Image (tube, rainbow, N blue to C red):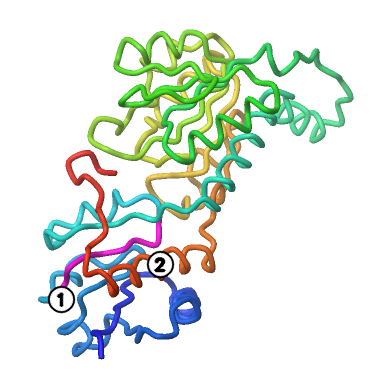
Amino acid sequence: MPAPLVLVTSLEPAEDVAWRDALARAMPEEAIATSADPEALARAEIAIVANPPPGVLARMPRLLWVHSLWAGVDRLLLDGTLPPVPVVRLVDPALARAMAEAVAAAALHLHRDLHLYADQQRRSDWRPHDTRPAHARTVTLLGLGEMGRAAALLLRAIGFTVQGWSRTGGAVDGIRVFSGADGLARALAGTDILVNLLPLTPETRGLLNRDAFARLPRGAGVVNFGRGAHLAEDDLIEALDAGALGHAILDVFETEPLPPGHRLWSHPGITILPHIAAPTSRASAAGIVAEAVRSFRGTGRIPTGVDRGRGY
């Protein structure tokens, strides 16, 4: 009988159980244990994780590889006790579609000035604003992985002028792509709406800062769907208060949930979302993990993990 799989999370108990049930439905042939089972920790070769508590994976002497239930693994890689085994992140087309929808919604919100009308509604102010066609707006995507490419294609279908920036500068059909520091400066200079979808790495931490905002045209919009640590909050508030930026839509924060009374909640230039841009589908994610586990059981080949140096 194969060693059990171990689900390791720091989720709320009800959510932990829901994930265990979804995984059990996706692979009924497997025994799925929790990190509270010391015998399972001693025998398991595969850990399935969602925000695992630091140190737990180090208690698995036979661990061969880890599969994350999230697309981002930056928090997991910060665990200094993480064993030197492959870490596989979730690559889910359903997640990419959901993110593309969220990016399109945010871009349209800024494009059609919906934040201005929401403010006017609170003041009973009936006042239309001039509109521009979508093709007259340039949306720049920072990050052109699976999610970024899906978002770029949807934005282009809506009619926006779309460009992107990535580490490699790899081609995306019909999209102008920049790379490097000089490329980022050129991309920002022509951006009406800036959307961040980058993974969090030492190089991208704090990338949305005073220098980046100063390179944007006056009144540009900013959307952060990457990680909270990409954003320098003081610099954002300074740029909004000075009128250098028009509006920001934020879905991710360094501390989540965003604490009550936090200054971002009440800033008139900011729309707050509770980390819902691309929610993970349990059924879809469980199916992807099940496919990886079955492949390993059948071939003995460990899936390719992320590049720990790059962080993705």
Residue found at x 29% / y 57%: 88
For label 1, the residue is 60
The outermost residue toward the right is 126
Q: Is residue 87 above or below residue 114?
A: below
Q: Is residue 69 magenta?
A: yes
Mark 1: amino acid: Met
Check residue 291 in the rendering and tell me which mark sits there, or answer none: 2
Residue found at x 51% / y 48%: 261
Q: Position of residue 143 (x, y in %)?
A: 41, 31
Name which quarter of the figure residue 292 lies in.
bottom left
Q: Is residue 301 magenta?
A: no
Dots 2, 1 in contact, CB < 8 A: no
Q: Is residue 153 left or right of residue 257?
A: right
Q: Is residue 181 above or below residue 296?
A: above
Classify mark 1: residues with Cα within 10 Å, few (<14), some (14-19) or many (20+). many
Give the spatial CA distance, label 2 vs label 1: 23 Å
Q: Position of residue 230 (x, y in %)?
A: 36, 34
Q: Is residue 80 left or right of residue 137?
A: left
Q: Position of residue 279 (x, y in %)?
A: 54, 55
Mark 2: amino acid: Glu
Which region is colored magenta?
Answer: 63-70
Disc 2 element: helix
Name which quarter of the figure residue 40 lies in.
bottom left
Residue found at x 51% / y 24%: 173
Check residue 261 in the rendering and tell me which mark sits there, or answer none: none
Foreground: 200 or 135? 135
Q: Position of residue 183 (x, y in %)?
A: 36, 12
Q: Quadrant of the N terminus?
A: bottom left
Disc 1 element: loop
Q: Is residue 14 left or right of residue 120?
A: left
Foreground: 155 or 199? 155
